[in-house]
Each structure stands twice: as C-alpha cells, then as structure tokens.
Image: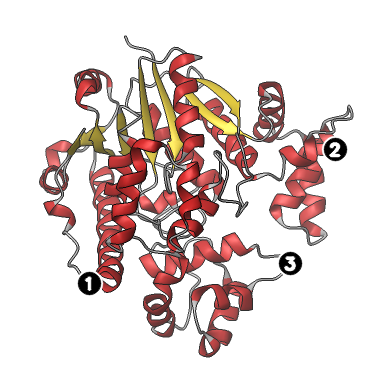
Amino acid sequence: MSHVVGIVCEYNPFHNGHKAQIQYAREVLGADYVIAAMSPDFTQRGQIAFFDKYCRTEAALEYVDMVLEIPVMYSTASAEGYATAAIKVLAETGIVDTILFSSENANPELFNQVSSIILNESDEYKSALQNGLSNGESFASARANAIKICIKQPNNQLDDFLSLPNNILGLEYVKAIKKYYPDLNYETMERLGQSYHSNVSDDYYASATAIREALENNDESAYIGVPSKLQDYYKKLIDDNLFLNFESVSQLLHLKIMENDSFVKYLDCNEDISNKINKNKNNYVNLPQFIDLLKTKDVAYTRLSRIMCHILLGITNDDVDYKNIRIPYNRVLGIAEDATALFTNMKKHSKILFFSSVKEIESALENDDCWDSTEHQKAAQRQYAISANSTNIYNILQTSVSANAALPEICHKFIIK
C-alpha cells in the first residue's frame, strides 16, 4: 500500500510554514500522499476561523492530497481532546501510516520519554501531580512540575518543552498514538520561523496570527508569508470581505449568554466559571473584553475562549467524553484530482464510514443499517447536528459582513482540485 503521511492542521490561513511541512513529508519522509485533518469553522483556541473551511480546503489542496474535517465538537476542545480526535480522524482512514507534526523542540526522545511518564502514571508522578493541584496550581502547571520530578537528570529543554504550544500539542499527538494506535509511526520536525503568537508579518515564515492581522488590515506584508500561488486567492477573499475575526461572534454570543442563567453544562466549564459568567454578564461589551473580565491566574484565557465558543455553538459535556473520544464517521472536504486512488484505498481499509457530501451524511443518518448500534447512530447524528449548527452560525456572521448570502452547506460541492 502507498506510504501516506497524515498532518493535523488548521491552515488558518495556509502559509509558508505549512508548505515546508508538506515538502518535508514528501521529500524527507518519502510520502506518496499527504492527508490533512483540518479544523472546520471554529478552531482549537475557541476562535472562529479567518476563512471558512471550504476556502481553506481550496487553498490546502494546492499542496496536500486530501482534506478531512475534524468534528467541530473536538476542534474546539482542550489540547488533549483536539489531538486525540484528530489522530483518530487520520488513523481511522486505515491508510495513514505516519503522523507528522511540527514542534518547537523537535526531539523525538523527549516526546517519547514525557508521554510515557504521563501514560504510565507511576506513583511518583500521581503523587506529585496531586500535590500540585492541592496547592492550587493549574493542571498544566501541576503536570509540568510532576514531569520534572520524574525526570531525574537535568534537562534544560524541559521548561520550553512543557510550555510552548506546538510542543504541548505534539505531546498530545504522541500520547494518543501510543494509547490507541501503537503501530502508527510519528515524526516531528522543527517549527520554522516566528513563534506561534508573533505579530511580525514581514517574514517568510510569519505566524498565522501575524498573517491574519496583516490581511485584516490590508497590509501587503501579509503576503510575504503566504505561498505565491495562494496570494491572488487570498487577495480576492479579502476584497470580497469573506473573512471573520475573533470579535465577529461578539453580538451573537452576547445573546446566548443573556439567554442563560447557568453555564455548567457547556464543555470545559465548571460551577465557579459559570457563576462568574452569570455575575458579570451585564458588563459584557464584546468577546475579548468579556474574557479579560473573567480571566484569573487559575483559569487561562484560552480555556475561557473555548468555553465561550462552546456556549455559542451549544456544545455540552454530554457531547464530549474526554476519556472516550469516538469519531462515528469521517467527512472528506476535498481531494486532489490526481489522488483519487486514496478513495479506492479508503473504501478497502477505512475503519469507519466516510462521506464526501452533506447529502450522503443525511441519508446515512436515517439508515439504521449503516451503524453498528443505536448508540453509534445517535453519536453520528449529534456530531452532524453540531457541525451543521456551527456552519450556519459562520454563514450568518459572514453574510453580515460581506453583504452577500452565504451558500448553505448542503449546496457546497465536493472539492476536487
């Protein structure tokens, strides 16, 4: 069978760093095909995507061979939930044999060592973790300190390894692979260019954050970090106002918050945070301001951002069980014209159903014979319902800024490029 490399991504938007990663997959790892598992219209930090999932699929297919959709209930989850779901999306195709990810510390041995400590949960690790939590440390801080205690030898890379965003995600990818798919290979390469949060746009390897900001401000420096074949495409999207930013959801989210008195049911929320949201909701001005109002040293900005996203999209604790993440079906958003052999291989080897259109999904959801059990069917129906709702919300918001009606999802054609 072909050598197929899987990449977890958001492509928000696609930039030169992403292009380099795909080149690494093909030229260094010798991939015959590259498949991307991509976040849809809402991303892991609880933010709305700059371009919609179809625009980002169009861009990605200039370089990858297939784009799969990470269900939005997981694309907006914690690092562990996001990574586990994304790995499952790729692994369940039955044809991906290697996962490639970028990280600030591209040290395979460190990923192996730290992931083993977390997964094996020695008494020493569990005791140190519990002590940290009892002393009021956040989970991330308590876990990092417990890992340092378990690694006896000095290791100057550990602080960065346990705190930088791509390292954290990479660690979660490795954990998921070891736990669920031990026969799946993984490779890491060093992240190129500016840091994740950098706002320096005039760099060949500018961050997605910097590129988004420059694009929004119509700053030509944005295109330095974008592959040449995508520059005109992005310019057209910007000219047509087909983009959204973090604040775009502010008014709609405000309405959702005012409609509720309790938020405990929403994914990643708890009673303390719910009470604080309720107490402060009359002071709501916009999303960034409200998160700043709520954040404390014990509750990270990104967690609050995800909670706000879950309130907006209606994603509850009943929808996501972090200890038992299941992907009922895969959705293929697009495929390269010369890579249609991937469909043939997936038909032979995929471990779950996969679809290339909303019509196919809706038809299957009503067919009891498509599913192993009623529980499986209900999980698929809920996954689709949340996805459809999130797309509707994106379309409503985009229509309001572009002054053009957004195409309903059922009318979107499968992308072959």
What is the CA distance from the residue labelled 2 to the residue labelled 3?
A: 23 Å
Mark earlier in primary sequence (2, 3): 2
Please name the amino acid that badge 1 sits on. Answer: Ala
Q: Residue at x 42, y 85 (%)?
A: 258
Tell me residue 141's x, y (percent): 75, 51
Residue 403 shows which numbered tag? 1
From the viewer's perspective, is 76 left or right of 57?
A: right
- Comparing 162 with 203, the one in front is 203
Please name the amino acid that badge 3 sits on. Answer: Lys
What is the CA distance from the residue labelled 1 to the residue labelled 2?
A: 56 Å
Helix, strand or loop at label 2? It is helix
Residue 328 seen in render: no
Check disc 3: other Cα within 10 Å, few if <14, some if 14-19, many if 20+: few
Residue 136 seen in render: yes
* Res. 368 image quadrant: top left
Helix, strand or loop at label 3? It is loop
Q: Residue at x 27, y 19 (%)?
A: 349
Kindly check if marks 1 and 2 are in contact, taking CB atoms under 8 A apart as contact: no
Tell me residue 87's x, y (percent): 45, 33
* Res. 194 image quadrant: top right
Residue matched to label 3 = 297
Mark earlier in primary sequence (3, 1): 3
From the viewer's perspective, is 96 left or right of 345?
A: right
Mark earlier in primary sequence (1, 2): 2
* Res. 111 image quadrant: top right
Please name the amino acid that badge 2 sits on. Answer: Ile
Residue 320 shows which numbered tag? none
Tell me residue 345's x, y (percent): 24, 18
Residue matched to label 2 = 149
